[in-house]
Image: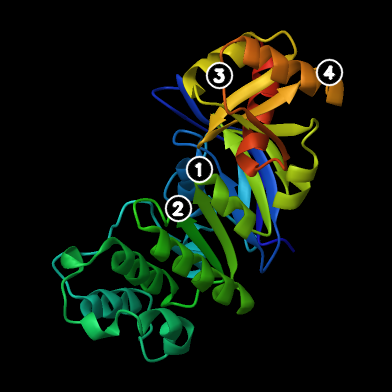
Amino acid sequence: MSALVLNNLSKTYTKGAVIAVDNFSLKVEKGELFGLIGPDGAGKTSIFRMLTTLLLPDGGSATVDGYDIVKDYKAIRNRVGYMPGKFSLYQDMTIEENLDFFATVFGTTVQENYELIKDIYVQIEPFKDRRAGKLSGGMKQKLALCCALIHKPTVLFLDEPTTGVDSVSRKEFWEMLKRLKEQGITIMVSTPYMDEATLCDRIALMQTGKILSIDTPQNIISAYPENLYAIKSNKMFKLLKDLRQYENTLSCFAFGEYLHLSLVNDTQTTLNELNEWLKNNEHLNIEIKKIEATIEDCFIKLLNTQNANTGN
């Protein structure tokens, strides 16, 4: 039995005018670390709220560990841990008081399940008497994760857990998730950060409530259909403008200090012609190198394909 099963799950707002989740279907296996990857407004939070029984779906169905999210909401609430995107613990209570409170709500104690949170809690234990509202972003994140785990859930939902924290805390957090996965906990995590996608077992790339692709990160990258080149010159804004007007350009987007470029007719002759064309258009210090696509490249490609198919 799969840990999560979603069948044509749908959610609308403003009396149906806004479609947040559009016939969304997927399965997540037990013990899997699954990522929902997409920008703000993709529908990630609405999916999490339905799966944790905080929102009723407008269509479709879903189960968590075999329990229906509508009929069996009480059973689900006892089995899942949920860390919402916004820090939602009691700001005026200390670390220790928050943890004791959530343990009591679920009829357990910190001592009973301490082994589950030990690796995380030892990092914030020296500050256990500090109020939650006075914690740094990384410490708030660790406290929220401890509170979500204290009742020993079988499925853990983490809604954009690393948004707004520094890169070191982000790395530490994903290392914690790997250790939790080793304990057999099923984890569904959402993030707008495309680089975090590669840290999941499988991912669903999302936009406007729909799935663009579901697979392992490497399989999605390997399926990128064209050669991809990183290119730069001394005039990056002009380079972007010129390349988008170039007759042999298939796609061109800005990525950090480079542009990522795909060509219609991709041969060495074509690349040589492109290089000469750029020189004739007053570009200097031209650098062109073949690269492997990233998850972000794949997302943009899939999004453009979807828009072309729908006429947007």
The tag earlier along the polypeptide, 2 or 3, is: 2
Residue at (44% x, 44% y) in the render: 55
Residue at (18% x, 75% y) in the render: 94
Q: In this view, which residue lies farthest toward the bottom? A: 111
Q: CA distance from mark 1 to mark 3?
A: 35 Å
**Relative vertical location of residue 127 with respect to residue 71 in this rendering, above or below:** below
Measured as percent of width and height from the top left, residue 172 is found at 45, 69
Measured as percent of width and height from the top left, residue 76 is found at 52, 62
Task: Please name the residue that numbered disc 1 is placed on.
Answer: 44
The tag earlier along the polypeptide, 2 or 1, is: 1
Q: Nearer the viewer, mark 4 or mark 2?
A: 4
Look at the numbered disc 1 and give the secondary structure of its residue: helix
Q: CA distance from mark 2 to mark 1?
A: 8 Å
Circles 2, 1 touching at the beta carbon (< 8 Å): yes
Task: Please name the residue that numbered disc 2 is placed on.
Answer: 159
The tag earlier along the polypeptide, 4 or 2, is: 2
Answer yes or no: is residue 43 visible.
yes
Residue toward you, 309 or 55:
309
Look at the numbered disc 3 and give the secondary structure of its residue: helix
Residue at (22% x, 80% y) in the render: 127
Task: Please name the residue that numbered disc 3 is placed on.
Answer: 239
Q: Nearer the viewer, mark 1 or mark 4?
A: 4
The tag earlier along the polypeptide, 4 or 3, is: 3
| Marking on residue 67 | none
Left or right: where 36 falls relative to 30:
left
Task: Please name the residue that numbered disc 4 is placed on.
Answer: 265
